Image (cartoon, grey):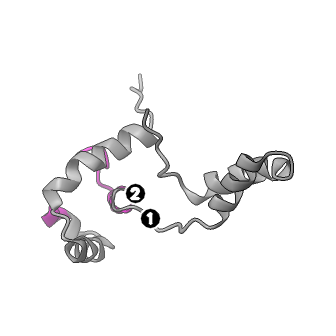
Amino acid sequence: MRLNLDLPPSNWNKLKKVLEPYIEEFEVVEKVYYAIESLDFEESFEAELFKILSASGHNPINWAEQSLIEKCPGGPSLIRKLNKTNIKWASLRKSYFDYLQNNFKLTIKN
């Protein structure tokens, strides 16, 4: 089983509020609660790419070439971060589509 934990901070905060009344009753709830409290909410490359494409009016469902991202606001910064981690643009493609699949539900409008 794979558990996707790339959630926005608002979802983590909601979960923390739900768990709070039970931290005294259950040790495992207490551990999860404090683990959430200590999370670092740095955005993933995939989430940042999605935001860049959406904000620039590009379709975030289609894979964008690096040259397009470099022209978008926030794009050059993302490319620099990727280069510092030695992640290649092409290798981000699979994880980006996994991110889309795990975080969004695509529907067809009639």
Residue beneath the point at 69% across and 55% down: 31
Asked whether, in this view, residue 69 is left or right of residue 36, the answer is left
Residue that carries the numbered disc 1 in the rendered image: 43
Image height of 9 relative to 29, above or below: below
Residue that carries the numbered disc 2 in the rendered image: 47
Image height of 56 relative to 110, above or below: below
Residue beneath the point at 62% across and 67% down: 38
Label 2 residue SS: helix
- Give the residue type that dot 2 points to: Ala
Q: How many marks?
A: 2
- Label 2 neighbourhood size at 10 Å, few (<14), some (14-19), many (20+)? some
Residue 40 location in percent, x, y?
54, 69
- Residue 30 on the magenta span: no
Asked whether, in this view, residue 109 is left or right of residue 19, the answer is left
- Pointers 1 and 2 in contact (C-beta within 8 Å): yes
Image height of 26 relative to 105, above or below: below
Magenta segment, which residues? 48-68
Q: Residue furthest front?
A: 27
Residue beneath the point at 28% across and 75% down: 81
Residue 50 location in percent, x, y?
36, 55
Residue 21 location in percent, x, y?
86, 49
- Residue 63 on the magenta span: yes
